[in-house]
Image (cartoon, rainbow, N blue to C red):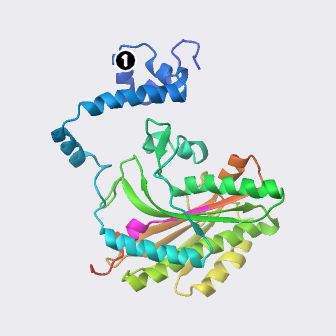
Amino acid sequence: MSGPSGQGTDQPAEAHDPWLGRVLREGATPRLLTALAERLSPTDLQTLLLEVYRRRAAAVTPGRLLRAYEDNRFTAPSPLDAGELTRLNALVHDRLARHAFTALALSPLCPLGTNSAVATVDQNKVVTTVRNTEAVADATNVLALECAVRRRQLLRADPRSRARVRLAATHRVVRAQVFAGPGMTAHFALLGLCTAGRAESSFIFETAALTEQIGVHLDILDSARTLGYRVRSVRVSVTDLTAGRHRRTLRESVLDPLTQAYPATAFVFDDERGAGRGYYSGACFEIRATTPAGDDLNLGDGGFTTWSADLLSDARERLLISGLGLERLCERFRGHPR
């Protein structure tokens, strides 16, 4: 919408992004950004951009194409052995089936706004297409959409349904932000888990879902040792985001049972955790392990979100999401190459 100055949204955008500001100042069309972002319908904008990129693609020569392939960080193949990733992926799916998670083969694309609308991730961190879609940057966001669709069907049949939806996907995600550090690439393989259900008394859904998802990740890490992965000193930290209201329940219903099931794993509370506050609600967890080289690395992370409640406009809907870094596991925890 246009502001009092009549500049629309161009001025705020220019103030926040100097590169965009230069483009807007040098552009021949006044209020170009406002026209593209607000006055054109999504379909009309798509039509316009498709023609723009059709013309740009027509000007690409084989030589320029090869240079672009070599220089573009989004297009380089993974440095990891595809066969090794395939073996790890097969192991993951075997464990998922044992834990009654339904594995999905996700599309490489998801609707525009999948990351920003529910997960509040800046759109600049996502690879957006000209067809009103975006590359999947986090499998759990897409799994959350599918969970909402399936939970809605259950609620239509029974408005009080507590049936839980358990979905999983191994997916090569693409992220636009530049990551610092060795081995950090624009695309990488992740395992995403989502458990959706209905609020129950005494934090029952939350503790059951936490125990289950953490157990899936630990089972995968234990089983990966059969493929030669050296995963040592696994540690799980749980954070109560309710100012301690559920700490006792989390200990008795999550940490204690998992300690019995996985005695070689350390389970602790992390009351100092800062990451994820405001993103997660209720409780969250982190999984760390030591590499063969002695480095302490994050391998998994998860927590409860309000995405199901937001998507279904129902405050009693619950959702636990988590991810496990398969690419990091494959790259940093292999003892010796085959």
Residue 263 visible in the current orientation = yes
* Residue located farthest toward the left when viewing the structure as drawn: 63
Of the pair 232 and 94, the residue shown nearer to us: 94
Q: Quadrant of the C terminus?
A: bottom left
Report the span colored magenta.
321-330
Of the pair 112 and 243, the residue shown nearer to us: 112
x and y, in percent, of residue 30 in the image: 43, 13
Q: Residues within 10 Å of mark 1 (few under 14, many from 20)?
A: some
In the image, what residue type sits under mark 1?
Arg
10, above or below 191, in the image: above
Q: Does residue 154 appear left or right of residue 105 in this picture?
A: right
Number of dots carrying numbers: 1
Of the pair 78 and 47, the residue shown nearer to us: 47
Judging by the rendered image, the residue that carries numbered circle 1 is 25
Q: Quadrant of the N terminus?
A: top right
Residue 326 falls inside the magenta stretch: yes
x and y, in percent, of residue 250 in the image: 69, 72
Of the pair 172 and 43, the residue shown nearer to us: 43
Residue 306 visible in the current orientation = no
Residue for point 65% across, 57% down: 147
Q: Secondary structure at mark 1?
A: helix
Q: Does residue 20 appear left or right of residue 285 in this picture?
A: left
Image quarter of residue 316: bottom right
Residue for point 45% across, 27% down: 47
Image quarter of residue 303: bottom right
x and y, in percent, of residue 192 in the image: 53, 63
Residue 5 falls inside the magenta stretch: no
x and y, in percent, of residue 327 in the image: 39, 66
